[in-house]
Image (cartoon, rainbow, N blue to C red):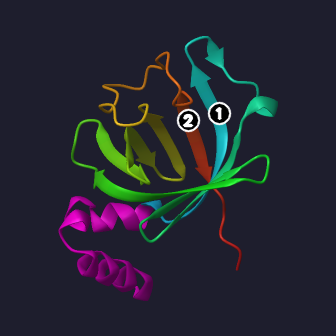
Amino acid sequence: MIGSFIVFAYLMAEGTESAKVDANELLRLQGTWKLVAVEEVGGNVPKEELKIDTVLVKDDKWVVNLSDGGRVEAKIVLLDPNAKPARMTLRIGQNDFNAIYLLKDNTLKANVADQNQPAPADFRPVDSNSGGVSTYRRKPQKP
């Protein structure tokens, strides 16, 4: 419960930009997500070729931990679970990455557009640099 209050208070302090982030949905996303599959136009990417290991969602940060040890940090600036399909925007520097997503229990599916492009309309992979349709599983929290 205290975690809910902290995230809510953080979003309120951020001002109008955070008004685009649904606080309850952001709470549902909190945690570490393991990339389990990527579907591109030609089919599924072999697991040994996946470049992303995990994504950590903490507060409004989306931290991508790469398989090679690298790391990319984005800010969640839009999170709209009421859109059909649900939408999110991740900001890295001055670039926005618009996406659609489906969050069900401990599975997160996302289709991210190339930088500064409109969000995809559905979960079909398109020929782009965005990395295809990604499926993540929430990693259990350590006690």
Q: Residue 124 lies in what quarter of the image?
A: top left
Q: Relative to 28, does residue 10 appear above or below in the rendering?
A: below
Quarter of the N terminus within the rendering: bottom left
Seen at 79% across and 47% down, the residue is 68
Q: Position of residue 19 (x, y in %)?
A: 20, 65
Q: Position of residue 80 (x, y in %)?
A: 26, 51
Amino acid under disc 1: Ala
Q: Position of residue 95 (x, y in %)?
A: 39, 45
Amino acid under disc 2: Ser
Q: Earlier in the sequence, mark 1 or mark 2?
A: 1
CB atoms of marks 1 and 2 within 8 Å: yes
Q: Relative to 34, does residue 29 appear above or below in the rendering?
A: below
Seen at 41% across and 31% down, the residue is 113
Seen at 58% across and 20% down, the residue is 40
Q: Which mark is residue 134?
A: 2
Helix, strand or loop at mark 1: strand
Write down the residue under mark 1.
37
